[in-house]
Amino acid sequence: MLELQGIYKTFEDRAVLSDVNLIVSKGATHALIGSSGSGKTTLLRITLGLIPFEKGYVRIDGQALLSLTQVEWADRIGYVPQDGGLFPHITGRNNVALVAKLRGWRKSRIEDRVEELRKVVDLEAEVLARFPREMSGGQKQRVAIMRAAMMDPAVMLLDEPMAALDPLIRSSLQQELKSIFGRLGKTVLLVTHDLGEAVFLAEQMTMLHEGRVVQTGTYRDLLLRPANPFVTQFINAQRTLPDAVDLQ
Amino acid sequence: MRRAWAMVILLAASLPSAASAAEPIVVGGKIFTESYVLGEIAAQTIESATHVPVNRKLGMGNTGILFEALKSGAIDVYPDYTGTLAEALLKRPDLKSLEDIRQALSALDLTTSGSLGFNDTYALAVKEGFAQKHNLRSIGDLIPMESDIRAAFSYEFMDRKDGYPGLAGNYHLSFDPQKVSRMEHTLSYQAIEQNAVDLIDVYSTDAKIKKLHLRLLDDDHDYFPVYQAVWVARKSFVEKHPREWQALLGLEGRIGEKAMLDMNAQADIQRIGFAQIASRFLGAQSPESEGWMKEVMRRTKEHLWLVGVSLLFSVLVGIPLGVMAVRFHATGQAILLSSALIQTVPSLALLCFLIPVFGVGTKPALAALCLYSLLPVVLNTFTGIRAVNPIHVENARAFGLNRRQILFRVVLPLASPTLLAGIKTATIVSIGTATLAALVGAGGYGAPIVSGLSLNDLPTILMGAIPAALMALVAHGLFEVLGMVLIPAGLRRRP
């Protein structure tokens, strides 16, 4: 379970986040949505332990972020950066294995774990021998998920996982991603500006606007019982939302 | 005489000697033919009188630096001229007699022999044809055409009070400053040969005077001081090696003007080696010459040592400095600025500054090379790291890599192409700059270049210049290979 409670963050005397609360229950997939400037990237960096914040708690399975070192925290939260964020100078396999190697895992243990995850994300073994520049967008995304899951973290955090992908690939990968999440069985927080993606992948979503949570709930809640006019405005602005989404 | 190449500096010898019995006697010499010949004569004379090994540090820089080397004990003895000692070293142009000069030197714990037998003074020279055309016999004859004369004077002649400034005052000469150029002494002979200039300063025993058919203009006013050749030595050397000093004193009055001019001609015109000329003069067996292959090998070893050590230093110090420059902004700017400032100091001047700190020989040469090769490495490390996408650093932190791991696993590998390019630049620059190490007696490919330059002997120059160029080419190739090994495959250009 991932809990963010009463998070406040100011930047040069300007409030960037005010009293942000967000809870993702164990095994659930939750979307954090908001337009650029809403504070969602700041919240993501706070969740990763990369920047300090003034007030509040971040907890994973009851363990507070501030009670752990950056290294200990990193093992509890698997991060998939935008576009995969693979290191360009090493192969896919070495990207996946990097942290485990630094933690002194035995070679056979690393190999077994990589093989296990490769099956989960359904990637051809040959792709792992390639360098990132030789991979397609979808392949990079899968390798990045393997890397994030390598240390068996309790929580997975994905930043705009589909943003850079071609629409056709995106729709097939979305399906894929959903089943990968199912197979991994992790608690997942998905950060996105794309409501369609959020609706497709996540049961619950939290909408952030000007550093505050405006509403948390299902897409149905947001659509039918918007907390304020901004929620409706945000939903209506999503032109890429497929018409075929059937709410009945 | 003095002939110092003003542009050149330094001296020889490895280090100030506290001198144990086994320690070699170090003979110095300046960087022109006559000084090479006299230095070789001194070295062979000592060798025939003793079993103490003799270390030759011939072909070193100008008078001032050689004098410093003598005072500091880096060399024991070298040939110089009374006029030079009085004017350039003691700053006492009033001292005329050898006895007075010796007395003044005594205060510095130095001494001299008596005159070796010839006077090699400054003179002004024009081409024979030019002299006839303008009816020139003496220096005074230049006055009617003073604004048309194109002159090339050596640096030292231009700067010494008993050189050009005093001469112009004494003869009321005023050349057009636009037409007077300062030039390295050896090159001024070439300049007059090719009619690029009309008038040069020479030394009266120069072999090239004959070779180039130059006419020496008479010094009607007896302006130029007397330049008797003498041995200059440290008193401690004289006390510790009385037998060797006596052998050197045995040469007093034995080298006449004609003998010296002949020996200079043998070197400059007949291209006979200095060692052979000296042994012929001393009536000894000609020592075996080294053979060019062997010399090139020896020079290669010396050169590789200079380049290798300085490169190791620049990598071990330059990369950490570059990393620091990125991490601490203010310190970083200071580091970059100071390494750039070092780069603007001319190499010879830098060598000169380093002598008080490191003495002479390989040490100051290495120090200078280290400083020069620092900038490309520091700058490229800095630039390379700054060019790394900060996203990768943040991601690495999010994955739980610590600072060290981020530096070695992410930042340095990503910066490695730029970094390696910096090391490559440093290597090539250092191969070139190391040729100047000869001026501080550190050997290397610069030694044949410097001695060939003073003899105006192209084959000897090429003996240093060609291997130096080849070494640069090999280094270039080596770095291509190194790039394939060191730069992570994911960053390499696709074939």
Image (spheres, grey):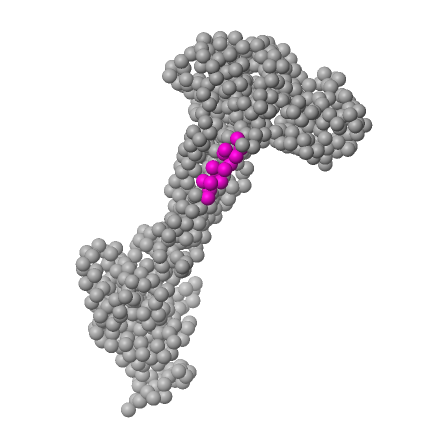
In which quadrant of the rendered image does the C terminus of chain A lie? bottom left
Q: Along the line of sight, which residue is nearer the eye, A100 or B81?
A: B81
Q: Is residue B370 above or below residue A173?
A: above
Q: Main secondary structure of the magenta part?
A: helix
Q: Which residues are magenta?
A: B460-473
Q: Position of residue A178 (x, y in %)?
A: 27, 77
Q: Position of residue A41 (x, y in %)?
A: 37, 69
Q: Position of residue A118 (x, y in %)?
A: 24, 68
Residue at figure coordinates x 29%, y 66% from the top left: A127
Q: Is residue B277 visible?
A: yes
Indicate left or right for B257 with A172 as reference.
right
Q: Along the line of sight, which residue is nearer the eye, B23 or A227?
A: B23
Residue at figure coordinates x 42%, y 20% from the top left: B17
Q: Position of residue B275 (x, y in %)?
A: 50, 20
Q: Is residue B410 above or below residue B90?
A: below
Indicate left or right for A136 with B272 as reference.
left
Residue A239's quadrant in the figure?
bottom left
Q: Along the line of sight, which residue is nearer the eye, B464 or A51?
A: B464
Residue A242's quadrant in the figure?
bottom left
